[in-house]
Image (cartoon, rainbow, N blue to C red):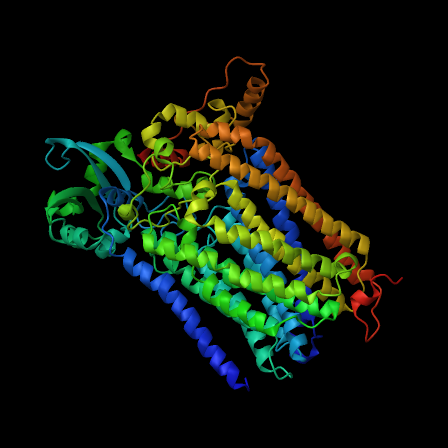
Amino acid sequence: MAFREYKIGARMFGAALGGSMMITLYFPTSDIVLVGSTEWGLQKALSYGRIGGFSYEDPLMRGEGKPVTVTLDKDPATNQPIDPIHAYVYPPGVPFPSAINHPRTAGKVVAELSTTKGRINEADHQKGAVFVVAHAEAGGEVTAYIENASVTRNWNPQQVLDAAGDENSAYVGSGKIMFVREGCWWCHTLLPEQTQDWQVFGVPPRLGDFNSESPTAFGSDRKAPDLLHVGSRNSSKEWMMMHFFNPRLVQPHSIMPRFDYLWGKNDANGKPIDFDQWRAEYTKYAAGERVYPPEVPDYAPKSDIRYLMDFVLSLK
Amino acid sequence: MLKYLFAKNEDIPPGTTAIFFGFSSIIWFVIGTGIGSFNAAKLAFPDFVTGYEYFAFGKMRQVHVLAVILGWISMAFAMAMTYITPALGNTRLWSEKLGVWNVLIWNVGLSLALTLLWMGISSGREYSDIIWPIDLAIIFGVLFPLGANVWMTIVTRRTQGIYTTNWFFGTGIFMVIIVFLVGNSPEFFNLTGLSEAYMTWWFAHNVLGLWITPVAAAIAYYTVPKVTGNPLYSHRIGHLHFWSVVIFYSTPAAHHLMSAPLPEWLKSFASVEGVLILVPAIAFVSNLLLTMTGKWHMFVENVEIKFTITGVLLAIPLNMQGGFQQTRAINWYIHGTGWIVAHAHLALLGFSTFLEGAAVYYGIQTLLRRKLYSLTLANFHFWFLLIGFCTYWISMTIAGLIQGAGKIYEVPYIDVVIAEHPYMIARWVGGTMVFTGNVVWLYNMWMTARVGTEIPVGRLPHELAYER
C-alpha cells in the first residue's frame, strides 16, 4: 500500500464502519431482545411454527412441517367441557418456534413463567406436543405465557386433532407459507401505520407483538388494504372464497390477481375443476351475456386455498 | 467464453471479463425491464394474462426487482470495476481467469436464484428475498471473487496513489459483502420478531447506500474526467463524499420503518442521519458538475457524458426526496405509497442506471476498440430511457400523493384503486418505453461488437463519434 496515509485511512474506515454497525445493529437489537412478548405475539408464534418462509422442513414451500391451530370446548384427555380455548398442535417431527426452542426470545418474564409453570422445556419435537397460552400474575400484572399441555394436561397431538375435528382446525402456519409464497405481502401490508391507520385498518402493532415470528412480512408497497386485522373486519368464508377465486366477483374495481389455481385440481368432493369452462362462463358474465356468474367450487379440505384462508381469517 | 475458462491466465486477452460482464448486464437489463413492464401491465389491467400460476403478479414482482439489482446494476458495476480499476492502476486485471469464472457463476447463480423466486421459494424478506443457501453462494461465489480481483488489482497497480474511483470500488465491494453477511443473519440464525424486521431494512438500506450509490458515483468520477479531459474539480470534496458515505449512509436504516413499533430513539437517530445523507450527495453532485466547466457542449454532443450528467442531475431530486421524505413530518403522509416506488425508480432507474449506462457504452467501445455502431440508436436509447423513466416517475409520484390523501382522509381503499388507474396505465407505458429502449441498446451494442468501425491506436472512441 506504500503510503502511511492508506494505513491511517484503512484504520479510520474500520472505526467508522464498526462504529456505525455498533450503533445501528448492536444497540437496537440488544434493546429489542428485552421486549416481552404480548399474548398476541405468543399466539402468532405458536400458530406459525418455526419459519414462515423457506426452511429445511419445507424447502418447496408447500406448507409442510407446520403446526395446526385448533379450537377446543372439551378437554380431549378427560372429555370434560372447558371454556373454548385455542390449542397449537405440533404433530411428531414438526419443529418448534423460537419461543419454545429459545424461551428468552419471548422476553424474560414470559420465558420464566413458560419454563417454571408452563414446563415448555420438557417438550420434545420428535414426540410432538400441544401448547396453549395461559395467564399468570407476575410482578403485579397478568402476563400471558406458554403452557406445554402435553405435560400439564396430558394432551397428545393426535388426540387433540381428533377431538377438534376438521371444522375446528385451522392450518394457520401453512397459510402463512402461502401468504409469503404467493406474494400477498407485495400489496397487502401487515402493518397499520402508527400515525393514521387506526380508524380503517385498526390498531398498529405493539413492540411485543412479533417475538419469535419470522419473517414478519410487514410489506412496504401498499397497493391494497392492510390485512393485520382483516379477520375482525370481515370473517365471511363465502366472501373470501369468491374474492380469492376471482376478486372481480365481489369487487368489480379490484386489481387483485385471481388465485383460482390455489384450489388445485379437484374440489371438495374430489371432482376435477374445469377452469377453462369456469373462465369462459365468467367472461360471458363479465360481458353481460349471463345474469349470474358461475359458482365458485368448494375447496378440498387440504388445499393451498384452505391454508391461505385459515391464515387470513386468523388475523384478528 | 468456454475456451477461456480453462486457458492460462496470460493467454486471456485483457478486457475479456469486462466485455462478458458488459453484455451480460445489458441482457439482464432487457430481461428485468421486460418483466417490469409485464408486471406494470398487470397492475393496470388485472386480467391481462390470468389463470397461470407462474404469471401471477406476486410471483414476478421480486424477479423484476432482483433481476435489475443483481443482474443489470451489479453486473454493470462488475464490468466497470474490471476495466476501470486496471486502467486507473496502469495495469492489467489481477486475474482474467477468475473474472471469466466470476461471470459464468454469476449468470448461472442468478438464473437459479430468480427461478426459485419465480416459483415462490423465498425468505419472505423484501430485497433479501433470496433464500439463504443462495445468499451464501452469492457472497462466496460471486461477490468475494469480484472483490479479490478488484483489491488485488489495486494492490498490484503501477501508479503511486489510488484515484477516487478506486477508493469507492474497493470499499464498495467490501461493504456489500459485509451487508450480505450481516443482513441475511436472520435467515442464517433464525433471528425473529422485530430484530428480523429491522435487519431486513438494514439490508435493504445498506445494499443501496453502501453498494449501489457509492459505486455508481465512482463510475461518474471516472467517466467525466476521462471523456471531457478535465481533471476532477476537487480531490478533497471527493474525500468528503467518501467519508460521509461511510458514516452517514450506513446509519439511517430504521427510517424505513418509521411507522412500525421500533424503539423511538432509533427512529429519531435514523431520521437525523437520513437528512445528513445530503452531505455526500451535495459533495458528489457539485464535484462532478464543476468538473464539467468549459465542456458543457459535450452534454449535448457526447453520448457518455449525456448519460453520466443526466444521472448526476437526477441525483439532486433523488437526494432531496431521500433526505426529507423520511422525516416524521413527511413520512406519515407518503409512507407505503406509490411515492416510494417512484423514489426507488429514481434511484435505480434514474440516477444509477444512467451512470452505469455510460460506463457500459464507454467500456465496450474502448475494450473492443470499436466505434459505436449507431449514434442515432444510442440517442434513441437515451431518450426512450429518459422519457420512459420520467413518465413512470411522475405518474407514480402522483399516484402516491393520491394514496397518501386517501390514507389520511380515510377514503375507502377501493376508491383509491379507482383513482390510481390512469397513473397505472401511464406507469406501464413508461416502463414499456424503457424496455423498448433497452432492446434497441442490446442490438446497438451487439452490432458495435460485430461491425463497428475499428478505433485506431492512440485515439479515444468519443473523439471519432462524428467521423465516418
Q: Is residue A232 above or below residue B251?
A: above
Residue at position x 41%, y 74% in the image: A15
Quarter placement of the C terminus of chain B: bottom right
Most foreground residue, B242 or A168: B242
* Residue A5, position as x, y percentages in the image: 52, 82
Q: Is residue A193 above or below residue B462?
A: above
Whole-percent x, y for residue A234 in the image: 35, 27
> Position of A22 compared to B208: left or right?
left
**Which quadrant: the N terminus of chain B?**
bottom right
Which is more toward the observer, B306 or B1? B306
Q: Can residue A290 be seen? A: yes
Residue placed at 52% from the left, 55% from the top?
B113
Residue A242, given in percent of the width and then of the height, sits at 44, 25
Q: Quadrant of residue A313?
A: top left
Q: Quadrant of residue A284?
A: top right
Residue B49 visible (yes or no): no
Give the left or right position of residue A136, taking residue A61 as reference. left
Residue A182 image point, x, y percent: 46, 41
Q: Give left or right: position of B436 versus B424.
A: right
Q: Quadrant of residue B307?
A: bottom right
> Residue most toward the top?
A291
